[in-house]
Every structure is written in C-alpha cells, then in structure tokens.
Amino acid sequence: MIDRRAFISDITLGLLAAPLVAEAQPTGKVWRIGDVFAGAAEVSEVLTKALEDRLADRGYVNGRNIRLIHQFVPPEPARLEEALAILISKIDVLVVWGTVSAVAAKKVTRTLPTVFLTVGDPVAIGLVKSLARPGGNMTGVTFEASAETYGKRLQLLKDLQPDLRRVAVLRAAGDSNVGPAMASLARLAPQLEIQLQSVDVRSAADLERAFATMKSKRAQGVVVVAGAFTYLNRQRIVELALTHHLPSSLPFKEAVAVGGLVSLGPDLVEMARQGAAYVGKIINGSNPGDLPVEQPTRYELLINRKTAKALGVTIPQSLLQRADQVIE
C-alpha cells in the first residue's frame, strides 16, 4: 500500500519558488507570449486564466507589458504543427500544455524559447537532453512526479480491490506518454500478480468499443494513461467506466470530480505558477536550455466515495486518511 509520507518524500519539489514581489523586467518592449492548448477552450480555459493570473502576480500584465495569445487546437499532431508554424512568427515566447503540443512544438521550432507544461517524460520523449541541463530551446514542468507514478496508480486499484488480477490500460494511440507509462506499470504489475491489458483508442468514437473490449476480456479495473485526449474526454471515460462497472484509476483530479473512482496527479492550476516563473526568467534574459526542468510542486490523491459505493468497492480507512480530498 502507498505510504503517503514516503510518497511525498519521493517527489522532488520545484527548483523555482514564486517570488513574493513582482520581478523587474526589461522596459520598452511588450513581450508576445503564445499559450497553446491541445483541446477546446471550454475544457482548458481555467488553466489559461491561471497562467494569466500568475503572470500578473509577477508583474507581467496582459495588455500592458505583455500580450498573451491563446490558441486552442484539436489534439492532433498535424493540426498542432500547422497552428504552431503560423504562430511562432508572431510571438517571443511559447507556452505549450501537454505532451502532444510539446512534441509538435519541437518539430516546428528549435530556436523560439519554449516552456512546456504537463509533459510526461521530456527526456524519454526527446524534448530535452536531461532534466538538469535541458539544452536547446525548451524547458518546463513534467506531469509525473517520478518514473513510478503509474505503478502507484496501479497499486491504488489493488488497495481498493485485493483480489484484483486483470487491469485494462486505456491509451491514446500514438501518444508519446504511452511508452513511459507502460514501463512504469510493467515494473510493478508482476509483484502485484496483475495482468495488464492494453486498449488503444484513436478518437472519442472509439471509447465505447474500448470499454466493451475491456469487459469481454474480464478486466476488473482500468488505469488511464495521461494525455491531451484522455484529459479532454475525461467525462465520457468515467461515465463508461461506471456503466461497465469498472473501478478507474486516473491521472487527473478533474476526472474524479465528475465520477472517476481515484486519482493521483498534479495540481494543474498550481503548475501555471511554475510556468509563469519560467516565462519571467526568459523575459529577463535566461536561456531555456539552462533552466532545469521541474517536477510538480503539488501532487494530490482524490477518492470519490459516491462512485465507490456505486461500484460496491469498500475504501480502506488507511486510504481515506491519506487522501487529500474525498468526494462524497
């Protein structure tokens, strides 16, 4: 079972702390900052607002000394590359949310200062040379706190169902997060005597078929791989998990808020503060390649008690005590 204190100690806190006062910046120039999300505005606008607010906290006010250009693009590599190719000539700094956006940005530009947020494993994916010394034009914040986070999500399902033997892994086909996620899951699954069943989807239309496949293979639970697709479709994913009576372990707390069983993941709104710190440093002359990649500064465990009751799952008291939030 997960020891909450041990888990927290495994998480390396971010190297950049938010300043208590607004930082100075070069005068006479309005910095143009592109802010790109893979997904619809109504799903991601809370993060757009968070980044704008955190920049303002640091003295960079949209419409005064910076100009924020928000773009919401379908989470498809070709569409993202096309949009970014047009955008990069109009901005001085690029902020991209999610692995699919960051990979597209890497293909489009090797020179524009770029901050990525919520990327699974930037070294394995090839965005940076190392976390300590990124090199190139990119730096940012990872989505996972450690390489073993997916193993911990699998462990959560085992804690909730001691007789668990077969777990489906819902993955977006072609997502660069899949490789590191499966490696983490594969390391722990044999110890837990769990068989993993990979189920790939390419579009939202595939989800119903995917869950029917899980049930036909007698899956007893589902672990969802983080990515733009699964974040954008979280509502439908948890609805189908409930319909098919499958306990779900998720990377997004937003998914538990709408009916998922349990989640272990970063606070994405808090990550906007980390992103704003990077933007501020770049405006003040820092080279992104010299700024170490950070990990999330806040990681949360959420449990939905109402969903557990609907699924007939008994939540151990020890797990309830470790949770950051229990949704009734």
Image (cartoon, helix red, strand yellow):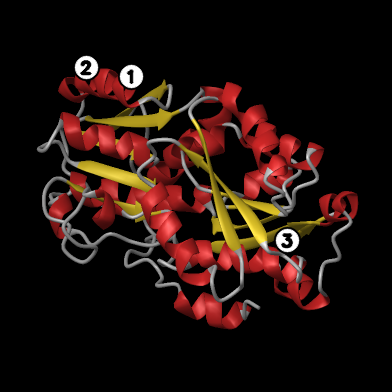
Image location (x, y in percent) of residue 235: 68, 34
Q: Residue shown at 43%/46% (left/top)?
A: 54
Residue 152 vertical position relative to residue 256 in the rendered view, above or below: below
Q: Which mark is residue 325?
A: 3
Q: Residues within 10 Å of mark 2 (few under 14, many from 20)?
A: few
- Residue 286 in view (yes/no): no
Q: Quadrant of residue 113?
A: top left
At x 15%, y 21%, the residue is: 89
Q: Secondary structure at mark 3?
A: strand
* Type of amino acid at the residue the image marks with label 2: Ile
Q: Amino acid at mark 1?
A: Arg
Residue 86's tag is: 2
- State the image coordinates of residue 326 (x, y, percent, origin top left): 78, 60
Number of the label disc, if any, that sits on residue 79: 1
Q: Which mark is residue 121?
A: none
Cα separation, mark 2 vs mark 3, equals 42 Å
* Dot in front, 3 or 1: 1
> Nearer the N terminus, badge 2 or badge 3?
2
Q: Position of residue 122 (x, y in %)?
A: 28, 53
